[in-house]
Image (tube, rainbow, N blue to C red):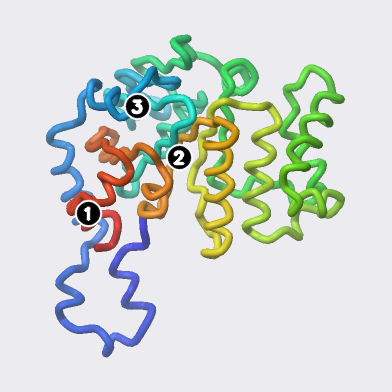
C-alpha cells in the first residue's frame, strides 16, 4: 500500500499545511474499517474468470489457510492466465503475503485447492512447486547472500537441477540477458546497489525456468529510478518471455498500473477484483489505497 497520508506531515513544516489537509487524513484503523465495507459483495468466480478472458493457468478455489491454527485467508479465490499479471493490494495485515506463501507451500492449508494448468498442487512442497510445477517465489526480504559473488548467488538458484552443469548453463543464459549483473559476476553481492540486488533476486529465480513468478513487494526499499528498472524487467518477463506474474505491492498505484488484473484483499477475504485500470479509477480504492 502507498505511504499513508499522515506521513506527509513529516515531509515539511506543519505550518505549510492547512486544516483542510488534515480533514482528508485516514488513520490505519480508519482505512481498515472503510476497507471492510468494500468486502460486503465479494466478486464471483464468474467475474474472476471474465477478467482472465481465457483458460486460467493458476487457480485457487475456496482457500482457507494460515499459520498453525490461525486462519488468515477465508474462502479465497484467484484466477490468472498465461502471460498475465495480477497485483494484490489491501491494508496492512489483510493477508496479501499469505496468498503467495500459500501458493508456494509455506502455510497450513485448511481447505481449498490450488491448481496449475488443471493439476492439483495444493499439498506439494516448495521444492516440488519450483521443480515440477514451475513456480518461483521472490521473497520480500533481502535474500541475496552478500559474501558470495553474483555468479555464486545465481548458481544457488539452480540447486534443484539434476546436474551442476545444468545450473551453470542456466545461470550463464540469464546473465547474458542482464549486462548489469554479468559485468559484476565476480564481485561480492554485498557491494551491489538496492536495485541491482533486486535484479539479482529476480534473475536467480529464473534459473529453474519457471512459468509463474510470485513476487512479494518488488519495489520495497528502492529508490524511484530502481523501481522503474524493476518494473521494466517484469514487463519484459511477462510480455517477451511469457511469464505469469502474481505480485503483492505496497505501492498500489505502481502495481495496478503494471498489472492486467488487480485484487483488493481485506481481512483475509477477496473484497474487489477488476482490471488494473478499473481499480485505479475506482474512487474508493483511490481514497483508501492510492492517497487521493
Are there few (<14), some (14-19), or many (20+) residues within 10 Å of tag 3? many
Q: Closer to the camera: disc 2 or disc 3? A: 3
User: Residue 222 appears at what percent x and percent y?
Assistant: 55, 60
Q: Helix or strand or loop: what does disc 2 sit on? A: strand
List the residue tagged with mark 2.
247
Q: Nearer the viewer, residue 209 or 50?
A: 50
Looking at this view, is 27 or 161 the one in front?
161
Q: Is residue 35 left or right of residue 151?
A: left
The quarter holding residue 129 reads: top right
**Mark 1, residue position:** 31
Look at 47% across and 16% down and name the residue there.
116
Q: Relative to 157, is 24 on the left or the right?
A: left
- The residue most toward the top is 119
Position of the C terminus, as image quadrant, is bottom left
Dot 1 crowding, Cα within 10 Å, few <14, some 14–19, many 20+ = some
Is label 3 in a helix, a strand or a loop?
A: helix
Q: Residue 71: image x %, image y %?
A: 33, 28
Q: Which numbered tag is attached to residue 51? A: none
Q: Determine which residue is flagged by label 3.
A: 52
From what the image shows, is residue 135 above or below residue 40? Answer: above
Amino acid at each position: 500500500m502507498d505511504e499513508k497520508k499522515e506521513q506527509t506531515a513529516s515531509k515539511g513544516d506543519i505550518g505549510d499545511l492547512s486544516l483542510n489537509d488534515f480533514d482528508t487524513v485516514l488513520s490505519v484503523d480508519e482505512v481498515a474499517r472503510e476497507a471492510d465495507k468494500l468486502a460486503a459483495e465479494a466478486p464471483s468466480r464468474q467475474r474472476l474468470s471474465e477478467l482472465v478472458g481465457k483458460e486460467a493457468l493458476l487457480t485457487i478455489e475456496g482457500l482457507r489457510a494460515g499459520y498453525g491454527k490461525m486462519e488468515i485467508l477465508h474462502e479465497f479465490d484467484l484466477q490468472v492466465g498465461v502471460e498475465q499479471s495480477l497485483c494484490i493490494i489491501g491494508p496492512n495485515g489483510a493477508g496479501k503475503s499469505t496468498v503467495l506463501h500459500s501458493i508456494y507451500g509455506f502455510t497450513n492449508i485448511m481447505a481449498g485447492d490450488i491448481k496449475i494448468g488443471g493439476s492439483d498442487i495444493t499439498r506439494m512442497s516448495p521444492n516440488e512447486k519450483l521443480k515440477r510445477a514451475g513456480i518461483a517465489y521472490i521473497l520480500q526480504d533481502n535474500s541475496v547472500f552478500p559474501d558470495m559473488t553474483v555468479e555464486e548467488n545465481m548458481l544457488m538458484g539452480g540447486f534443484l537441477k539434476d546436474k551442476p552443469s545444468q545450473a551453470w548453463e542456466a545461470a550463464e543464459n540469464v546473465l547474458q540477458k542482464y549486462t548489469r549483473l554479468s559485468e559484476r559476476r565476480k564481485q561480492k553481492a554485498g557491494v551491489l546497489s538496492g536495485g541491482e540486488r533486486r535484479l539479482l533476486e529476480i534473475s536467480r529465480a529464473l534459473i529453474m525456468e519457471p512459468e509463474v513468478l510470485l513476487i512479494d513487494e518488488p519495489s520495497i526499499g528502492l529508490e524511484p529510478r530502481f523501481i522503474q528498472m524493476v518494473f521494466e524487467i517484469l514487463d519484459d518477463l511477462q510480455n517477451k518471455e511469457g511469464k505469469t506474474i502474481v505480485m503483492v505491492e505496497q505501492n498500489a498505484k505502481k502495481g495496478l498500473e503494471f498489472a492486467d488484473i488487480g485484487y483488493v484483499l481485506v481481512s483475509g477475504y477477496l473484497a474487489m477484483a477488476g482490471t488494473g485500470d478499473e481499480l485505479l479509477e475506482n474512487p474508493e480504492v483511490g481514497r483508501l489505497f492510492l492517497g487521493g
